[in-house]
Amino acid sequence: EVQLLESGGGLVQPGGSLRLSCVVSGFTFSSQAMSWVRQAPGKGLEWVSSISGSGSGGSTYYADSVKGRFTISRDTSKNTLYLQMNSLRAEDTAVYYCAKDMWRFDYWGQGTLVIVSS
Amino acid sequence: EIVMTQSPATLSVSPGERATLSCRASQSVSSNLDWYQQKPGQAPRLLIYGASTRATGVPARFSGSGSGTEFTLIISSLQSEDFAVYYCQQYNNWPRTFGQGTKVEIK
C-alpha cells in the first residue's frame, strides 16, 4: 500500500525557515519522481516543486514564486522527501502536500500546515 | 506559463443529474491533462489522467475528454459523494499549472 506522511509544518515568522518532510512507503522511492503542491486557506492548488527519479538524474523544478527560496531534496536511505523553505513570506501560508508523481499526482499525503505570521 | 481556466466556478446539480465541467488551456497541452477531486479537509484525489483515462478505483460515471486546449469532465449521474471541488492540471509544460477549480454543489 502506498503511503505518504508529511510533517514539519508550524508557525514561523516572516523571513524564517522551515523544513518539511514526507516519509513514503509502498513503492520504490529512489526511482520515482516526487512533488510538493500547496493550498492556501480557502484557495486552489498550486504546484510548488518537483524532483525527478534517480534514472532521470534527480533534476529539480520550482515554481517562480518559490525559486531561490525553497529547495527540494530526497534521502533514499530514509525514504524521505524534503522541502527546505527559507525567507518565508506571509503568502507562503498554506497546507503543503507531497505527492507521488507519475506526471500525474497519483498519491497524496494528508498535508502539513505552514503559517507564516508575526 | 500556461493558464488553465475552469468553468463554471460553481455548478449546482441535483443528485442523479449529469454534471459537465470545462477546462481550457491558454495554449495546447496535447492530452497532458489530469482531473482531481477534493473534498473539504481532504487531500486531492486523482480522477482522470491523460485527459481521458480513469485512475484506479474511479467509478465509470466519471469520464474525461478533450485535447489541445479544450477539456471536459462529465459526471453522468451525480451521487452524494461526488459533491466536491474539481481541479484540472496540465503537465505538458513547466511550470505545471492548475485551474482555479469548479465547486459542484447540491441544488
Image (cartoon, rainbow, N blue to C red):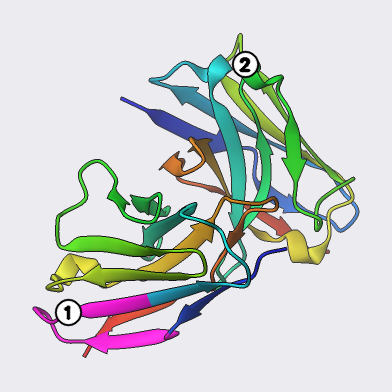
Q: Nearer the viewer, residue A26 or B67?
A: B67
- Badge 2 crowding class, 10 Å Cα cut-off, few under 14, some 14 to 19, many 20 or more, is few
Q: Quadrant of the N terminus of chain B?
A: bottom right
Question: Which mark identifies residue A55?
Answer: 2
**Residue with the mark numbered 1:** B18
Which label number is shown at residue B31? Answer: none
**Residue A24 at what x, y percent from top left?**
48, 25
Residue A95 visible somewhere in the drawing = no
The residue range painted magenta reads B8-21
Q: Is B105 left or right of A46, judged from the image as shown?
A: left
Chain ID of residue with mark 1: B
B15 in relation to B97, above or below: below
Q: Which subunit holds the residue at mark 2?
A: A
- Residue toward you, B39 or B58: B58
| Residue A104 picture location, percent across and down | 47, 44
Identify the residue at horizontal 12%, vertical 80% (top origin): B15
